[in-house]
Image (tube, rainbow, N blue to C red):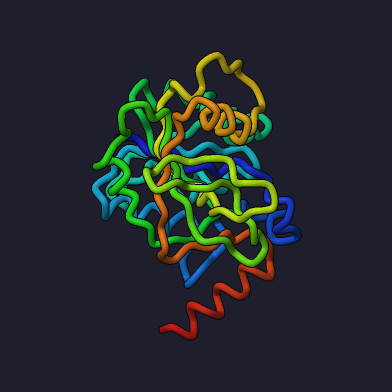
Amino acid sequence: MKVMILAAGVGERMRPLTEHTPKPLLRVGGLTLIEHHLRRLAGEGLRDVVINVSHLAAQLTQYCGDGSRWGLAIRYSFEETPLETAGGMLHARRLLGEAPFLALNGDVFTDYPIGRLSRNGLRAGEAARLVMVDNPPQHPHGDFALDAHGWIRHRAPGGSGLTYAGIGLYSWALFQGLAPGRTPLRPLLDQAIGRSSLGGEHYAGAWEDVGTPARLEALNAQLAESR
């Protein structure tokens, strides 16, 4: 199964660090964020990787190369300007092929065993399956609810749910009718919820959205203490 790492964003909230360094090349625990992903993918036997690039693209392509030093085969989907998540996925379709594919955000830190998603695959009726995590302090109410049968629902007004981890397994059915161009993922997920075709699973392990310099610093301090 092919894997897409989403790495095209500018990283506005991470400025000034991202003015000269793409966010996935920021370091956590001595390694770049993207290298943590690449090592985990190699360990899970997931070899075919597509990385979308735009902001400071040359730095990412030079750092990752063809992926051979990790035992991977990496190809790149170039975006003149960042196309957001759904737009970036659709733009990379020629590289990803027509089968379901895995995707993960290049700016999260996690020990989630992503190979589990590929082994389990999609259930009947699922257009996509998302990994959900406990809500971080900066996002206390979460994104969606997850029912007892593993289907994602809209959370009740004023209620709490879980947070989308930026990790998922997608079929092209989710993108049916989508025109090329800049498009966020959330509207497609909302539509899939309306069709009862969005599955999910809860992961309680390590996960951090490394979205600001303060969170990056805190994560590095936490990892240093745990050594």
Q: Where residue 24 sits: x, y (%)? A: 55, 53
Foreground pick, 72 / 211: 211
Foreground pick, 171 / 64: 171
Residue 178 in sight from this viewpoint: yes
Q: Where residue 45 sits: x, y (%)? A: 24, 47
Q: Where residue 77 sits: x, y (%)? A: 51, 31
Query: Quick check: 11 above or below 26?
Result: above
Query: Quick check: 215 above or below 100?
Result: below
Query: Quick check: 124 above or below 37?
Result: above
Q: Quadrant of residue 204?
A: bottom left
Direction from residue 204 to residue 11 in the image, left or right: right
Task: Identify the residue at image location x=55%, y=28%.
Answer: 194
Foreground pick, 106 / 55: 106
Task: Identify the residue at image location x=64%, y=45%.
Answer: 56
Q: Which of the image's four quarters has the N terminus?
A: top left
Q: Quadrant of residue 130?
A: top left
Task: Identify the residue at image location x=52%, y=40%.
Answer: 153
Direction from residue 200 to residue 156 in the image, left or right: right
Foreground pick, 224 / 124: 124
Q: Which of the image's four quarters has the C terminus?
A: bottom left
Residue 78 in sight from this viewpoint: no
